[in-house]
Amino acid sequence: MNPWTDLGRVDLSDALLDRQIVGEDGTVVGKVDDLELRAEGGTYVVDALLVGPEALAERIGGPIGRLLHHIGRGFRAQAPQRIPLNAVRRIEPTVVVTTAVAQATDSPSEDWLRRRVIGRIPGAGRASR
């Protein structure tokens, strides 16, 4: 299932980047940090969503990108986590992926942020997804 069929031109930065990714079962995966694209007939096609500080570092670049790259190395991130587009089930305010892909996508940085930062914000446990 391809959620982009018949959409024509889409502003990918608005449609995907920085959106929360969750599994169909509610498993929180992280945010869409970058996209993997391939050229096809003069246009670009999204092959996968990329998650993790390494992907975000590449997208941002400059000193902040270098800092994110360093942080990613601290979480033993070798490469961004790749979520194939065929695993995307719906695009709402969040990007919903299959439960199997959500549970298989390991994001140590997201886990750390959730435990050490977000979890300490008053009311964060009641936040809607």
Image: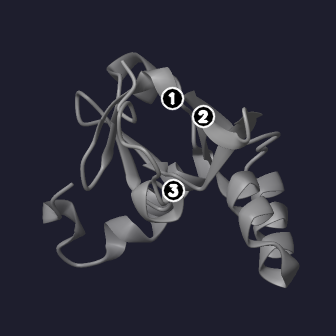
Q: Quadrant of the C terminus?
A: bottom left
Q: Left or right: where does residue 16 sit relative to residue 106?
A: left
- Type of the residue with mark 3: Leu
Q: Residue furthest front?
A: 41
Residue 103 makes an appearance in the image: no
**Which disc number belongs to residue 12?**
3
Q: Residue 27's x, y, as percent?
A: 32, 36
Question: Spatial distance from mark 3 to mark 1, Cα to Cα?
Answer: 13 Å
**Which disc number belongs to residue 85?**
1
Question: Which residue corresponds to the image point at 76% horizontal and 68% vertical from the top-left?
Answer: 68
In the image, is residue 15 above or below residue 44?
Answer: below
Quarter of the view holding residue 19: bottom left
Question: Spatial distance from mark 2 to mark 3, Cα to Cα?
Answer: 12 Å
In the image, is residue 1 above or below residue 48?
Answer: above
In the image, is residue 16 above or below residue 71?
Answer: above
Q: Left or right: where does residue 63 sit relative to residue 4?
A: right
Q: Residue 41's x, y, as percent?
A: 72, 32
Q: Which residue is mark 2?
A: 48
Dot 1 crowding, Cα within 10 Å, few <14, some 14–19, many 20+: some
**Tag 1–tag 2 contact (CB < 8 Å):** yes
Question: Which residue corresponds to the image point at 76% horizontal and 44% vertical from the top-left?
Answer: 77
Question: Which residue corresponds to the image point at 63% horizontal and 47% vertical from the top-left?
Answer: 35
